[in-house]
Image (tube, rainbow, N blue to C red):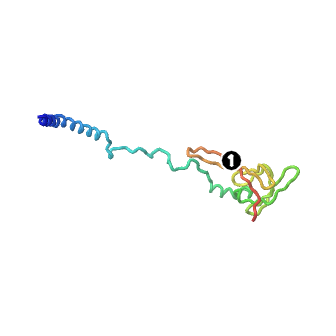
Amino acid sequence: MDGIKKLIIFLIIIIFILPVLSSKAQESEKTDIVNTPVLSQEKPLYRPQGNRDPFKPFIKIVEQKEAKSEVSTLLPPIKRYSLDQYRLVGILWSEQQPKAMIVDPERNTYVLGIGDEIGNSQGRVIEVRDNGILVEERRQLEDVFGQKKIETRKSILAFREE
């Protein structure tokens, strides 16, 4: 008898409770399907129109090649070349201020003191030392927003063996 009672309880569970559980499982599957977006209707996360190029550098150096080639013939030779193209050949020590002897690529010789200009990057001699000269140069930079900035850098023109 106990076996029959267990069988009847088991059949009641299968007949009444199992369909209820399966219908709830089907409803949850339907809601999962409804909540998941359809790929063909999904909008892209990133739209490049109107946005900055992520691979474009933040700073760009402004070079005016055409203007330099036209102006370079009008400038004196001391302002035509970059600082690394000049050669320091001597230092003159006097009681007033020390001077430096510089030779440019055209083999012109100049005697420069503190405050004199040299190079094509608005260089100015700020110190004459026993082994070279200290030159302050200015470069014009433009950032990604179009704002122009001036960068100041100091370089040393020293004796070199050739």
Q: Which of 156 and 9 is in front in this view?
A: 9
Identify the residue position indicated by label 1 in the image.
152
Question: What residue is shown at x 53% (from left), y 50% (from top)?
Answer: 56
Question: What residue is shown at x 59% (from left), y 50% (from top)?
Answer: 60
Figure check: 34 above or below 123: above
Quarter of the image for residue 37 reads top left
> Under tag 1, what secondary structure?
strand
Quarter of the image for residue 26 reads top left
Q: Nearer the viewer, residue 120 or 89?
A: 89
The image quadrant where one finds the C terminus is: bottom right
Question: What residue is shown at x 83% (from left), y 52% (from top)?
Answer: 98
Image label count:
1
**Residue 80 location, x and y as percent?**
71, 57
Q: In this view, does 1 lie to the left or right of 69?
A: left
The single residue placed furthest to the bottom in the displayed view is: 162
**Residue 114 location, x and y as percent?**
79, 49
Q: Which amino acid does label 1 sit on?
A: Thr
